[in-house]
Image: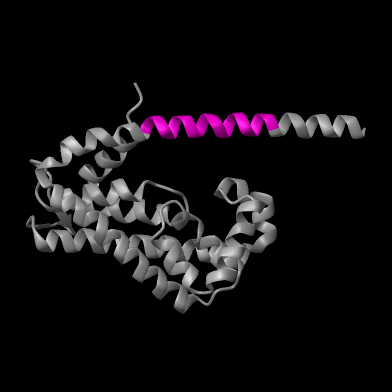
Amino acid sequence: MLASVTGQLTSAIGDHGVYAVFLLMAIDAIFPAASEVVMLYAGALASGAFAGEQVVLFGKTIPSGFWAFVVMVAAGTLGYLVGAIGGWAIGVYGGRPYLERHGRWLHLSPPQLDRAERWFDRWDDRAVFLGRIVPIARSFISIPAGVFRMRLRPYAWLTLAGSTIWCLVFAGAGYALGDNYERFDKALRYVDYLVVLAAAALIVLWLVRRRRTAGARKSAG
């Protein structure tokens, strides 16, 4: 039986702690990686909710409580910032032509890029900050910001501000849940079904589009 999506994430954090939080949040800056679940679990771990699991940084155990919470929030915030700068660099050096050829692998189709451009036209640099605190949209801001040539310094500061708020809110919720996290986690298991359904829908959509494209080519020939 395949491990659940949330189970894999929480297991990674349970096994690798701070480093897993950093890496998963860096990934989430470009690809959706359930950052809500990551930071909820990180906050619960910092509270000492899980027997035998502690926050360890550079070989040093951080006692459960305030400083463990600070370390987890910092790991999530800085990890997200690193990933966001990487996404920005892809946009800067690859540009729109690169996304037109390979955007589907980055979940950025031409229509999505057009929507991102309208978002930036409407909100200017504030689009980055707003995008970092809006679910789902937050993973689709990094690369377009590079494509549209947003300056790195304001981009980094706005990303840092938005991701700090995001990590504080979700890690704080996990910390507050504490020992009750296990019961709350059962509700998160339903996320797995949504992920599977979404993946199935995307596959069906891709097959339908491919068949229509093949039919159109055949008719034109």
168 lies above or below 36 = below
Q: Nearer the viewer, residue 198 or 82?
A: 198
The rendered magenta stretch, by its main secondary structure, is classed as helix
- Residue 169 percent coordinates (x, y): 25, 59
Q: Decide if residue 86 is on the left or right side of residue 25.
A: right
Q: Was residue 129 drawn as part of the magenta stretch in this picture?
A: no
Q: Was residue 193 drawn as part of the magenta stretch in this picture?
A: yes
Location of residue 12 by image quarter: top left
**Quadrant location, the C terminus:** top right
Q: Decide if residue 111 is on the left or right side of residue 43.
A: right
186 lies above or below 17 = above
- Residue 5 percent coordinates (x, y): 35, 35
Residue at left offset 44%, top offset 48%: 32
Which residues fall within the magenta stretch?
192-208
Residue at left offset 43%, top offset 66%: 130
Location of residue 51 by image quarter: top left
The residue sitting at the top extreme is 1
Q: Decide if residue 85 is on the left or right side of residue 15.
A: right
The residue sitting at the front extreme is 122
Residue at left offset 49%, top offset 75%: 152
- Residue 180 percent coordinates (x, y): 12, 41
Q: Nearer the viewer, residue 75 or 167?
A: 167
**Quadrant location, the N terminus:** top left
What's the coloring here?
Answer: one colour
Task: State how many labels appear.
Answer: 0
- Residue 166 percent coordinates (x, y): 31, 60
Q: Decide if residue 1 is on the left or right side of residue 179.
A: right
Q: Nearer the viewer, residue 106 or 187?
A: 187
